[in-house]
Amino acid sequence: MISVCTVFYPWTKEIERTEELFDALIPSIQRCEENNRIELSIVDTGTRDIFNRRRKHDWINFKERILKELPTAKYQIADCLVGQKWHMSKALMIAAAQAKGELFFFSGIDLILPKGFVHMMDLFVGKGEVWVPLCYNLLPGQEWTIPEKPEEMNGWRVAKGIMGIRREDFYSVGGYPVEKIGFRVGIDNALLQKCSKKYKVNSVKCEGLFHLHHAYSKASLPGKIER
């Protein structure tokens, strides 16, 4: 079993992007070959409060909608705030703990998996190996293919937060550094640094793996919550 582990941030920008889960990540899982080997593990770290503030979103049916699309999904609500700071490491460790797979793939909700995702995990995530794939950056609304005429933000990149790793290898290095309180870049780099000292890191272009660019979100900063 492969567990795709992801989290929701307690910020407005994530609420603006929740449809990416249903328009991108979940459909891409559903179209994967051998998708019976994939489960989705989600930790919700505070979206209910923001949904209620914004009113226009239907949080009550959010979990039900996920389970309708992916009945094997694991969904948990967790308090991952430390004072006014968000504890990303804690959220990801909870996602891993509730997952059942022997292989973990840590992902954002804005990722489109390739059809051959299961095969790629088997190929690049052997014992003592981690997979940090290069994905292609798409703009919202673009087709799930490399455009013939790329725009400025299109292109290959290492998307923060993406890593495939075996369960035992993940816990052998201590997982995400829970002593670090903050966001993806710092904790991802810390985990990769630990893994690179002990394991082989496979970092190659992954055809069909896309990241949805969101730098121009109209609510991309904390504190912009509509009350």
Image: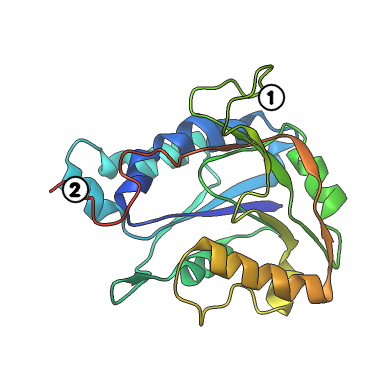
Q: Nearer the viewer, residue 62 or 216?
A: 216
The residue shown at (17%, 40%) is: 55
SS at circle 2: helix
Q: Which label's residue is closer to the chain start, 1 or 2?
A: 2
Q: Examine the rendered structure and indicate whether residue 148 appears above or below residue 124.
A: above
Residue assigned mark 1: 146
Q: Give x and y (percent) for residue 50.
A: 24, 51
Q: Amino acid at mark 2?
A: Asn
Q: Is residue 6 above or below residue 22?
A: below
What x and y, as percent, mark residue 137? 61, 36
Foreground tag (1 vs 2): 1
Residue 48 lies left or right of residue 227; in this view the side is: right
**Residue where numbered disc 2 is placed:** 52
Which colour scheme appears in the figure?
rainbow
Q: Residue at x 73, y 78 (%)?
A: 172
Residue 188 numbered tag: none
For the residues marked 1 and 2, what is the alpha-carbon distance in whole angstroms?
A: 38 Å
x 23%, y 55%: residue: 49
